[in-house]
Image: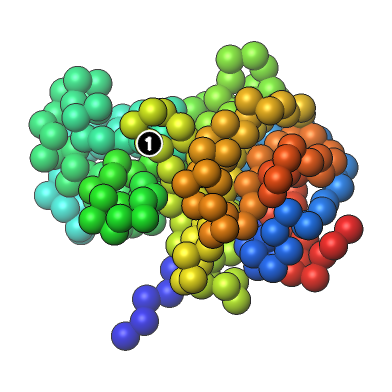
Amino acid sequence: METVELWPFSQGELDAAPDGFVDAVFALGPELRHESDVTRADYAARIVRGGLPEATTRTDPRRRQRFLDAYVQALIDRDVRQLSDIRHKGELRKLVRLLAARSATIITANSLESALGLSRPTIARYLQALEEIFLVKRIPGWSRNLGTRTTAAPKLIFVDSGIAANETAADARALLRPGAPFGPLLESFVLSELSRQLTWSEQPVDLSHYRDQSRYEVDAVLENRSGQVVGIEVKAATTVGPDDFRGLRRLADRLSEDFIAGIVLYTGTSTLPFGDRLRAMPVSALWQVSASTTD
């Protein structure tokens, strides 16, 4: 038996674009180049739109909001209750909103205990149910030690960025205001796009995140079956600097020759070099490049 994950539409599917970043970065490494005309406002609009077919066809924000509200409520009322003994449906709805506000962060049951007033075992069961109905996805922590990897705290993302944005009551314009959760939602958006590509990429790749005891972090770690690694950081800014590569340099030092490339995906327009095997690249490279892209 084979389980096939049916994700919402990817950006490449919506734009009839190549969607080939994973294969391209392993094939070309730091030689991969991409120039973009996608703006921060465009990225915000894509996050809010998401990829659910019914939502992408609704250009009226209010109609899209009503659909997304009804969709999540239907999942809770129908699918979750079939999978788990739900005695606190109101708290489960609150949990979904709380998770959306903490998109792309490390989530543990004990960190949610005080906010929800529920026991850790109950929260853990609800998190498992939300993952089984494909509303959220947990990205495991990376380590060369498989035993350590299985016990590392996971990072949580929403399968669809439109749902996450809707749960935080953020529209495309609001996401661009100071203090808005644009950064976490953009990271969740990137991680979900990478997850989609892993279902069709020629390169068998595992997705995880990196965080060590010295607080060096890398948002996404792509590792193929040969142990070769591409590290990816996500920045919502239109400019990047050397400090944005701090975690990637640490990962490169640990991996030596197994480190293929470190990419900071940002909302600027050009590919920029930042040292050996380190590049800044527009987020739109995720869906606008193919394995044969060299310029």
Observer able to see residue 76:
no
- Is 259 situated above or below 96? below
Residue 170 in picture, x, y percent from top left: 57, 27
Residue 187 or 292: which is nearer the viewer? 292
Q: Crowdedness of circle 1 by 10 Å Cα count: few (<14), some, many (20+)? A: some
Residue 79 or 120: which is nearer the viewer? 120
How many discs appear? Answer: 1
Q: Quick one: which residue is furthest to the top in this view?
A: 178
Q: In what element is the residue under mark 1?
A: loop
Mark 1 highlights which residue?
A: 212
**Residue at x 36%, y 55% (from the top left corner):** 144
| Quadrant in the picture for residue 265 | top right
Horizontally, residue 225 falls left or right of residue 239, namely left
Q: Quick one: which residue is furthest to the bottom in this view?
A: 1
**Residue at x 85%, y 62% (from the top left corner):** 294
- Is 135 situated above or below 248? below
**Residue at x 74%, y 48% (from the top left corner):** 284
Residue 150 or 181: which is nearer the viewer? 150
| Quadrant in the picture for residue 31 | bottom right
- Is 197 situated above or below 151? below
Residue 92 in picture, x, y percent from top left: 26, 37
User: Which quarter of the rendering shows the N terminus?
Assistant: bottom left
| Quadrant in the picture for residue 150 | bottom left
Residue 115 or 204: which is nearer the viewer? 204
Residue type at mark 1 is Asp
Observer able to see residue 285:
yes
**Residue at x 57%, y 38% (from the top left corner):** 249
- Which color mode does the image show? rainbow
Residue 141 in picture, x, y percent from top left: 36, 47
User: Which quarter of the rendering shows the C terminus?
Assistant: bottom right
